[in-house]
Amino acid sequence: MKILARYILREFFPPFIIALTCLTFILIFNDLFRLTQLFVQKGVNPLYLIELLIYVMPATLVLTIPMASLVAILLALGRFSTDNEIVAMKAHGIGFHQVMMPLLMLTGVLSIIDLGLIDYAMPQANRAYATLTRDIRRHNPTVVLEEATVMKELESEGKLWMYESTDAVSGRMQNVKIWDGIWNGKPRFSHAREAELGFQSGRAMLTLYDGHTYEPATDNSDSFRVTQFQKQALALQLKEALERGEFQNQTPRTMSFSQLQTFVAALQTSLQTSENPAYTLKRLRDAEVEYHKKLAIPFACLAFGLIGVPLGMMVKRSGKMIGFGIGLVLCAAYYLLLQVGQSAGLNGVLSPALAMWLPNIVIGVLGIIMNISIIGEGKLRAWRESDSKVALNRAFQPSHESASVHTGNAPD
């Protein structure tokens, strides 16, 4: 049994590593293209691009490890089937479960590794990615100013701004609009006829001319206070040189399991007393969906192992890549179900737990059915062969009457 397990695992790892590498680079290519555009606009050192790609890697590996495990199982068992090694194993009395158990144990180990990446590496990488991306977007803003376009460099701090056009003579921005405090529940809106952007001590200052500011009244009523100004300076926290800052805003994607549990419990407690229960409920669903998503994705390895083993055993010489093709379709179907479930969980159509675990349940149940079918087919075949042997022995066994005639005395 140990020899067989080592032989199966030795056949599994080369295609697993190749598939993991290829799938990771395919998924990371989109991030590479998007980040390259950002770096061209901002004129930042390319080393920061490499750093961002490293931060993206844990989130990518979390998705590609289950896919690579399914591909490796299909290729390993497909090679056994096409080379008739499965037939040889059956001829030597090796059962289906003896082939399946090493692969299921390995997918269980991969699930634990994936879970560790999600709980430890991915939150830290996401925090570092968000911080560095924010610092890069703050860098050298003059090269990305676009007319009639909302600037989102400071969205995480609750600030958006835009301008409609640029005066050809003065070079000032015309019809400038600024939204401030959009996340704290006390938004402030400023509208100026003109504005100009400059730097003071390496910091960006937006000077507004001839405008109004609208902000909530201090008496907690629904009214607004309007302030007129002729000139007003507004710090945008943008920088001429790239300066590394500290991570500030914690989101479900940047939390570990324990932090998410605490966050969910706090939202559940505040839901009853919240002044905006709809917004609090939205945040609660988002946190719960992220929590169950982080738990469900690693165990996709085990679900893919359950369905990958029977698929690999079904590959025949005439259809060498049939199992591989079906496996890729299953990977696409799994992540499609995951996206659909995530939307259903966020919208309240399904509970977050069911929405995120539904793809695992569907793939796992389908795999169990296929395993039972193969095991049952083997038992039925063995029963039929045994029944045929008994019938054959009875056909060739001489009856007592024939034996007595054969051994009797010759007639006189």
Image (spheres, grey):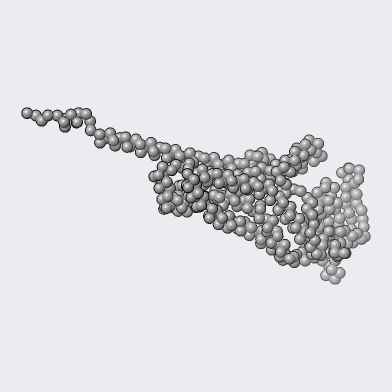
Task: Say if 200 sits above or below 181 in the image.
Answer: below
| Image location (x, y in percent) of residue 399 | 22, 30
Q: Is residue 189 left or right of residue 348?
A: right
Q: Position of residue 248 (x, y in %)?
A: 79, 51
Residue 316 visible: no
Q: How many numbered tags mark residues here?
A: 0
Q: Front-most of 264 and 271?
A: 264
Q: Quadrant of residue 173?
A: bottom right
- Towards the viewer: 264 or 236: 264
Residue visible at 72% across and 55% down? Answer: 129
Residue 163, quarter of picture: bottom right
The single residue placed furthest to the front in the displayed view is 2
Does residue 155 show up? Answer: yes
Residue 9 percent location from the top left of the image: 52, 50
Q: Is residue 374 above or below residue 139?
A: above
Residue drawn at (72%, 47%), measured in percent from left and top? 255
In the visual, does 239 lie left or right of 317?
Answer: right
* Quadrant, the C terminus: top left
